[in-house]
Amino acid sequence: MLLYQFLLKRGLESRKSQEEFFKLMLSAMEEGGVKIIQAPTGTGKTYGYLIPIVEKGQKAIISTGTKLLQEQLRRDLEVIKSYAGYILGNHVSYVVLKGKSNYLCLDRYYAEAQKVPELEMAINSGWDGDFEFVNLDVDLREKLCVDDDYCTPYYRNMCKYRYECYYWSKLKNLEKSAQILIINHALLSLREFENPEERLLVIDEAHELDKYITSSLKTGFSTYTLRIDILGRIREFLPSAHVDIESFFTDNFEHLFKEGKEEVALENLCPYAEDFEKRIMTALFSLYQRVKEEVMHSIHSFLKERLFVSLKLKDYLLNSGVLAWEDYLKINSNYEELSQEEEKLLKKLKTYQLLTKRLTRLKEFFQLMKEEKPEMGYMVSRSWSRKLQTYNYRLECFPVFPSGFIDFSGYKAVVITSATANPIDLEKTLGIVGDYYELEHTLPYHQIDFVVYLVDPREEDWKDCLMRAYKYLRTLYDKVLILLTNREHMKLFEKEEGLAFQGEDSLSKLVEHLREGRIKALAGLDSLWFGIDVKGEKGLLMAKLPFESPEDPITFHRIRFLKSVGEDPFEYQKRKALIKFQQGIGRLIRSKEDRGTIVLCDKRIFKFKEFLRVVEKLGIKVRVVKMLK
Ligand code: SF4
């Protein structure tokens, strides 16, 4: 490939596994089908799929885990794009697509009385409407984002800003013509993008695919939605309306949040349905009835006072379903655009309709609450809300295994890849089946010092050993990563100097601080096992083998479900822990220059031999340290 040859001359390191990746990509383009490629750290898998796509001018959709990774892909593609123009004369067009709620709705923004300086500046400087690039409060984003309940297809056609709309006009036009769409896994299951025909689908970071798909399929309600989205809108019509929403959540669920837990699995939601109906549904729907009467009264008195209304208002009244056909026929219209008063009425109607949509969803969710389905999982979670000045509780349900929620029909071919792509896991959790390829690793794993402290995490002295292991790594390295499996264990490190915890700042900033030596250690949970990149010499402390806690709501329901169908849930738990363990090891060595020591405080690695085999297969020698009591 010309582009690859050129990049080699410009200093790109040649890698056998990357060349293997190219071949697999080319055969996918020719033959179609589904390929699952395990490409270990150091393969250069991003270039592995980008170079053949660009070189062949192939239309493609690339899906990755997070918005952060989408931005990373954008940067890589920009590099390839500049060389492709120069070497191949190819113009590569691409677009980064995120969920609708990431973009500003101009209509909602201009309906606000107060202007926001950050947004004013962005709007006037060629911004693409993506909130990622403006510093905005989360609550405000939620209020101003593109929302299907607000921007219904009919309203979209008459929106004043439809031609400038960031999402429906600019982005969607780019999407139609772009050669490459960069999406994320949540969008992949929703298929919120142009029809995939003739496109090659690449799913990167596939080890977390089922987690993202499950999260994107969660449906539920929160105190925030009930209080701000529903009751808040009711109050625009009935200012003194009151419903005690919080007490339903605190009375029923607060006692479940013990020992720092913020998410709790629930067997089902049936036991709460009656109370939910009594304290929330009935109260909200009786207020809604009053709102409806008031809105109807406003419309009818408005129409009564006028001989003519605009064509747009007349059509809107019919198409939005607010007026009955007979009433519609009585309206006369002789001008096109909305008058100022009509605009005011329309604003009122929009609020009413948004309220109607939200309440319809609430009703649908209430139906789900009353049913108990073995293939569904249920949970309650809470997080502190600055706006509510209390906890925001969220009740949710989700498919236990999101099998069948990704539809591969219509794609030219599908390539699924990750450093730890596991075909059995993809089949069991997502129902994905394909040809499996395992590429060779190329990094100097044999230079890793892998130390196992012979201690059982279930015993008393484990915490002490963990701290000793940490001190040991700190004497050797200026950079230490601490991979934990339980939030509670963060407390053990609270008094340590120069140590930061995941969540104190954005992960990218914390990693930057570690790279630059502003902190000496970084401790965290999942995101540290999976998604960070710190180059150079470092120590890596693995608190224990990363079995998901059976109390985690998704794991809880998967275990329950597997038991109910007669399968051994431990096989599932082990598979997931192995993937996480492999990813954890991958945090130490990201390039040929990296070196370091891993300490694992868990002697069970000698009991569950699969974990030991992963280490040995990489050529890593294991050193054992006996712990003296
Ligand atoms: S078309 Fe829809 S999303 Fe776009 S500005 Fe208008 S209302 Fe907002």
Image (cartoon, rainbow, N blue to C red):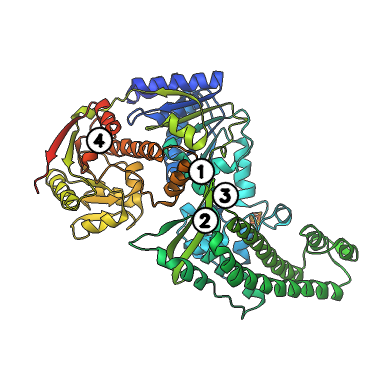
Residue 213's mark?
Answer: 1
Q: Residues under labels 4 and 3: Cα distance?
A: 36 Å
Q: Residues under labels 1 and 4: Cα distance?
A: 32 Å
Give the residue type that dot 4 points to: Lys
- The residue shown at (69%, 67%) is 352
Q: Which one is earlier in the sequence, the residue at label 2 or at label 3? A: 2
Q: Which one is earlier in the sequence, the residue at label 1 or at label 4? A: 1
Residue ID for mark 3: 373
| Label 1 vs label 3, nearer the camera | 3
Instruction: Give the crowd class for mark 4: few <14, some 14-19, many >=20 residues within 10 Å.
Output: few
Looking at the picture, tell me which residue is in the foreground, 272 or 17. 272
- The residue shown at (55%, 43%) is 187
Q: Which one is earlier in the sequence, the residue at label 4 or at label 3? A: 3
The image position of residue 345, as x and y in percent, is 74, 70
Q: Residues under labels 1 and 2: Cα distance?
A: 21 Å
Give the residue type that dot 2 points to: Asn
Q: Is residue 100 left or right of residue 593?
A: right
Q: Quadrant of residue 43?
A: top left
Give the residue type that dot 1 points to: Ile
> Disc 1 on helix, strand or loop?
helix
The image position of residue 61, as x and y in percent, is 54, 34
Residue 607's mark?
Answer: 4
Looking at the picture, tell me which residue is in the foreground, 577 or 498. 577
